[in-house]
């Protein structure tokens, strides 16, 4: 947080940190009203949930944090990637060269570490997983939540998927439709990370089927070529080309997907030939992930627009089929004829109502659904509902988009729109991973200090201040900016001094103070008040908590 005092003034004007303007929550509230009033009635009338196998949206789905889903074959490094992002293990994590992750795991923020069974997770009132009940007990027994306190999970939710099988393994019956579950999560994900191993680029039948169900979500997909440090530069060039060729055959799109190359875990690179390239690639990917909370409001609007277009097209299709049915005799025969002639019926509807081909459902799947229905029971087209859908696209949602930051905003309106919603996800920075941090120790003829990484000068202070920290009622292990501000103001220091102390103490730049950051803040205040020392330009390594020393590259030069 570059200017702590300025942000506190904004919060003071709006009450406190919990009441600060959050653009995403405001947008979510308005989207809920638009959905219930304009879209849901049409979904129910034309059975959108049946034809698209997508249940009606609930309030908690609009309020949900951004979701990141990781997909890939077994042993490509999905779970290791999550550990790298979190900077720690998580409950239920299993890593190995064999298919170790045999279930869908949703990582959520919470005060304690525990796993939550899938059946309990699906009925949790504050989590958007109730729609998974349709996949039955066989799936829910292979679904679990992993709860842990994490500054990353305060802003996003991570979904780890089972390794996609290949060869003979893919013939194993999972007991549920894997691709349909992936499709359900893809509809709700803000980002889909598709991982590949540099040593096995083969795309199995199950992986191809999984990629096929991601159609329509190409804007969310990011590909990762993982473990690329285990091959040399020439091999990497060939492997990268082979991957793009394979993806081009699998994904029917003229655009090339963005592929990030590197080794996405905390271990040092095995070879440093491409260290600079891997560092740049990792930085680009982490930047994509870090800004997800800021883009969440736009993503929610984008997904609702896609849903409205599909609902409107479905309404025209159902209304057309209903209008073709005879009043009394020959209903079954006419229905069979219409289903057999569905391609021509689609073309007729598209030309009559000036619809886009991309808004129509997949014709084979839709025809199978029609065989399970009775056209005579369909509802006729109701133009009032079509007009409500059009109002969403032409009036309500464009007006909502105007409330979001844009290039037309002046600095004043931009600050008003952003409010407190511009906090990024804290993500790992590992300079030593790329061979950059150990140079000082190597150049010192006396070597590095023993147990240098583990020693913390404020260990005893942390124990002494633990009760004091808990007495401030931290939420999920963190003090809010407002609570921390009140504590620091009681020290009697000048606002400029407190601004510097906050900048040094909030090491991970998430806008909150955990126990260790609180200890650093109190140490700095005490050094100024009791000992008359100046506030340092940057923290000595011995004062930085060991768990946060990997962020040292961000500590200096504010």
Image (spheres, rainbow, N blue to C red):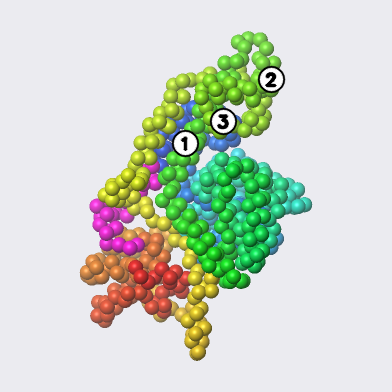
Residue at image mark 1: 305
Measured in 3D between alpha carbons, the distance from the residue under mark 3 to the one under mark 1, in whole angstroms, is 16 Å
Mark on residue 357? 3
Extreme top residue here? 328
Name the magenta segment's main secondary structure: helix
Extreme right residue here? 168
- Residue 14 is covered by the magenta coloring: yes
Left or right of 264 on screen, residue 468: left
Q: Which residues are magenta?
A: 1-27
Q: Residue at position x 25%, y 70% from top?
A: 497
Q: Earlier in the sequence, mark 1 or mark 2?
A: 1
Q: Position of residue 241 (x, y in %)?
A: 64, 55
Q: Position of residue 200 (x, y in %)?
A: 69, 58
- Label 1 crowding class (10 Å Cα cut-off): few <14, some 14-19, many 20+? some
Q: Secondary structure at mark 3?
A: helix
Residue at image mark 2: 336
Q: Position of residue 89 (x, y in %)?
A: 55, 64
In this view, the residue in front, 166 or 21, is 166
- Label 3 crowding class (10 Å Cα cut-off): few <14, some 14-19, many 20+? few
> Which quadrant does the N terminus fall into?
bottom left
Q: Earlier in the sequence, mark 3 or mark 1?
A: 1
**Residue 331, quarter of the rendered image:** top right
Q: Earlier in the sequence, mark 2 or mark 3?
A: 2
**Residue 553, quarter of the rendered image:** bottom left
- Label 2 crowding class (10 Å Cα cut-off): few <14, some 14-19, many 20+? some
Q: Position of residue 189 (x, y in %)?
A: 52, 47
- Mark 1 or mark 2, whichever is nearer to me: 1
- Mark 3 or mark 1, whichever is nearer to me: 3
With respect to residue 407, does 519 lie above or below? below
Q: Residue at position x 51%, y 57% from top?
A: 285
Q: Residue at position x 42%, y 62% from top?
A: 477
């Amino acid at each position: 947080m570059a200017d702590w005092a300025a942000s506190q003034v904004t919060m003071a004007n709006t009450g406190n940190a919990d009441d600060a303007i959050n653009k995403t929550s405001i947008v979510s509230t308005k989207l809920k009203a638009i959905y219930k009033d304009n879209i849901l009635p049409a979904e129910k009338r034309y059975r959108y949930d049946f034809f698209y196998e997508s249940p009606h949206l609930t309030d908690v789905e609009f309020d949900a944090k951004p979701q990141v889903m990781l997909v890939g074959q077994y042993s490509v490094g999905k779970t290791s990637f999550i550990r790298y992002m979190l900077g720690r293990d998580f409950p239920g994590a299993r890593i190995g060269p064999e298919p170790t992750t045999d279930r869908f795991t949703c990582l959520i923020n919470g005060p304690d570490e525990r796993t939550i069974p899938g059946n309990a997770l699906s009925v949790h009132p504050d989590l958007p997983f109730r729609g998974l009940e349709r996949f039955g007990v066989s799936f829910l027994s292979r679904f679990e939540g992993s709860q842990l306190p994490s500054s990353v999970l305060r802003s996003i939710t991570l979904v780890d998927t089972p390794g996609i099988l290949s060869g003979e393994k893919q013939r194993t019956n999972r007991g549920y439709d894997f691709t349909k579950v992936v499709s359900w999560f893809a509809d709700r994900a803000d980002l889909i990370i598709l991982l590949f191993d540099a040593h096995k680029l083969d795309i199995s039948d199950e992986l191809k089927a999984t990629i096929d169900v991601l159609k329509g979500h190409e804007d969310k997909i990011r590909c990762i070529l993982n473990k690329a440090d285990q091959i040399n530069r020439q091999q990497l060039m060939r492997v990268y080309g082979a991957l793009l060729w394979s993806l081009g055959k699998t994904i029917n799109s003229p655009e090339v997907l963005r592929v990030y190359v590197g080794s996405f875990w905390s271990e040092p690179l095995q070879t440093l030939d491409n260290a600079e390239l891997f560092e740049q690639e990792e930085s680009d990917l982490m930047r994509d992930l870090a800004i997800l909370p800021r883009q969440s409001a736009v993503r929610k609007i984008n997904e609702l627009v896609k849903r409205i277009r599909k609902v409107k097209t479905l309404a025209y299709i159902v209304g057309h089929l209903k209008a073709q049915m005879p009043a009394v005799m020959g209903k079954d025969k006419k229905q069979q004829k219409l289903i057999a002639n569905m391609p021509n019926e689609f073309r007729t509807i598209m030309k009559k109502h000036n619809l886009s081909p991309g808004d129509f459902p997949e014709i084979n799947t839709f025809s199978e659904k029609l065989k399970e229905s009775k056209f005579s029971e369909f509802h006729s087209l109701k133009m009032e509902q079509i007009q409500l859908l059009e109002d969403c696209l032409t009036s309500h949602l464009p007006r909502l988009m105007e409330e979001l930051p844009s290039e037309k905003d002046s600095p004043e309106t931009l600050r008003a729109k952003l409010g407190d919603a511009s906090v990024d996800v804290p993500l790992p920075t590992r300079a030593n991973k790329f061979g950059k941090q150990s140079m000082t120790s190597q150049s010192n003829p006396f070597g590095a200090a023993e147990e240098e990484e583990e020693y913390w000068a404020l260990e005893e202070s942390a124990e002494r201040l633990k009760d004091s920290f808990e007495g401030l009622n931290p939420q999920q292990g963190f003090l809010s900016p407002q609570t921390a501000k009140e504590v620091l103001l009681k020290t009697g220091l000048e606002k400029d001094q407190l601004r510097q102390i906050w900048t040094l103490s909030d090491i991970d730049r998430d806008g909150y103070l955990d126990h260790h950051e609180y200890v650093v803040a109190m140490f700095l205040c005490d050094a100024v008040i009791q000992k008359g020392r100046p506030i340092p330009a940057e923290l000595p390594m011995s004062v930085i908590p060991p768990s946060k020393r990997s962020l040292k590259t961000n500590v200096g030069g504010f």
